[in-house]
Amino acid sequence: MRDHPNIELHPDQKEQTELVKMWLVTVQHFFGGFEQLFSQVSDPREQSKITYPLVSMCFVGVQMFLFRLGARRQIQEKLRDNRHAIEKYNDLFSIENAPHGDTLNYLLKKLSVEQMQMVVAGMTKTLIRKKLIYPYRLFGYYMVAIDGTGMLTFPTRHCPHCLEYHHSGGTKYYHHVLEAKLVTANGLAFSLMTEFIENQEPDWTKQDCELKAFYRLAERLKTCFPHLPVCLLADGLFANGPTFSLCQRYHWKYIIVLKDADLPSVNQEFAALLPLLPDNHLTLSSGDYHEIEQIFSWATHIYYQDTFRCDHNLSVLQCLETKPDSRRGVITSKFKWVTNFDLTPHSIPILANKGGRLRWKIENEGFNCQKNGGFELEHAYSTHVNAYKIFYFFMQIAHIIFQLLEKGSLLRTIFSNGIGSAKNLAFRLLEAWRNAPLPSPAFFRTLPTRLQIRFDSS
């Protein structure tokens, strides 16, 4: 710890210091600080030979994504050899500088993927236990969106686990990931469980895929969250008998997209039943001038037998939404889902608008943000199989923390007029870390431990 007197800060520096305090206090408030957050991760290195404690390495790995540096080499450019950053690393972890990006990559090759997965799952479990997401449940169920996305693409084989795509120009090698994210109506998307889609055996005859990965993920999700009331939100790929059976076995609810080409017998029976059920229609208007019209139709107790000769009792809900478009015309969109919720005139609009249609949040607040919002999900932070998975989990940890900062009341106390885009907040956090001097040697030891953080529910 440095020995220097208290210093008077410029107003801009005070604002930056408050930003540093805000994100460290947020992590302390929800997760007990970074020491506690990574306490269950084993350090595989020989302790007598290390320069950087494990928590300091993980801290910098999370910083890389929190500050949206976009590449491992930016640790060297932005975080190392900066006087004010060095002061903070020294005060927090008693280290003389940030570790080099290559040093971080070397460690991540050896860390346990499963232990880091439990760090991410444990963060969301903590937020559930603290009832942060309690107001956003759907009839008592937490909405869990399932979807897959691409991570890495290579022109040549990257590892024995690469997936292959053959096309006229040759073969593409790639890695995908399947995510289960807890989503809310106010735009939160927290990672619950991750399943990497990859060929497990070198002599495979059928490639791994989203469906195979989903059954593995669902089992792990149930083991990690055995009592969590889950409402599964998924696209039409998962509208099948095994998924229905799995949800019945796990006591999960589901709202799954039903395309016209999916489950032909179910679609045909739904179309045949609608004219016979005049009471199963509901029209609602919304918008400032009632310009949005929604026509709901539904049918229950539709019998379906899957290819494994298992019987299912399904309900189908359809919404036709008409609203003005940008060219002063109108556009009509059709949404249709298969579900095991009880359908009533009261529950129909809620299940459609606050349930089924939230599935897109895993794509927007989740994957799109991480791909195009500065996290650079598709960038190869490492080509080592183990290391790139740990980097992926660092990204999920940083994204959870960032959402808590962005939606939390502490940010509004510093920037009462707002801060603009999420990228702007990330830039300000980086500049605060690099430029804000600590007002006293005891700064980190005097961070508040008891406070209240409220969240924007809009």
Image (tube, helix red, strand yellow):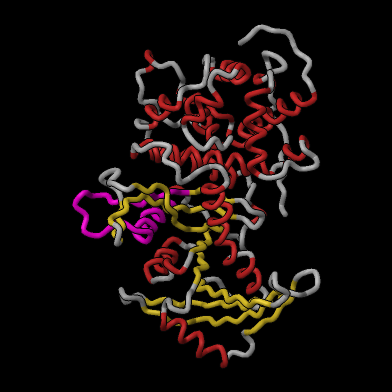
Farthest bottom residue?
A: 276
Quadrant of residue 210 within the rendered picture = bottom left
Left-right relation of 388 to 284? left
Quarter of the N terminus within the rendering: top right
Query: In the image, residue 180 lies at what x, y percent?
Result: 48, 53
- Residue located 56% across and 88% down the image: 274
414 vs 234, nearest the viewer = 414
The image position of residue 222, as x and y in percent, is 43, 53
> Residue at the spot x=69%, y=72% of the render?
325
View extreme (left): residue:
203
Asked whether 425 falls inside the magenta stretch, the response is no
Up-down relation of residue 313 to residue 122 (above or below): below
Range of magenta residues: 193-221
Task: Say left or right for 370 vs 133.
Answer: left
Residue 305 visible in rendering:
yes
Determine the image quadrant of residue 69: top right
Q: Residue at x 21, y 58 (%)?
A: 205
Q: Which of 124 and 187 is in front in this view?
A: 187
- Quadrant location, the C terminus: bottom right
Image point (49%, 41%), residue name = 120
Picture coordinates of residue 211, whole percent (x, y): 37, 61
Res 386 quadrant in image: top left
- Side of 253 relative to 215 (left or right): right
- Residue 142 appears in the picture as rendered: no
Where 451 sits versus 444, above or below? below
Q: Which of 2 and 114 is in front in this view?
A: 2
In the image, residue 365 above or below residue 4: below
Count how many numbered circles sit on residues in the image.
0
| Left or right: residue 124 compared with residue 309 | right
Residue 251, image x and y in percent?
A: 47, 63
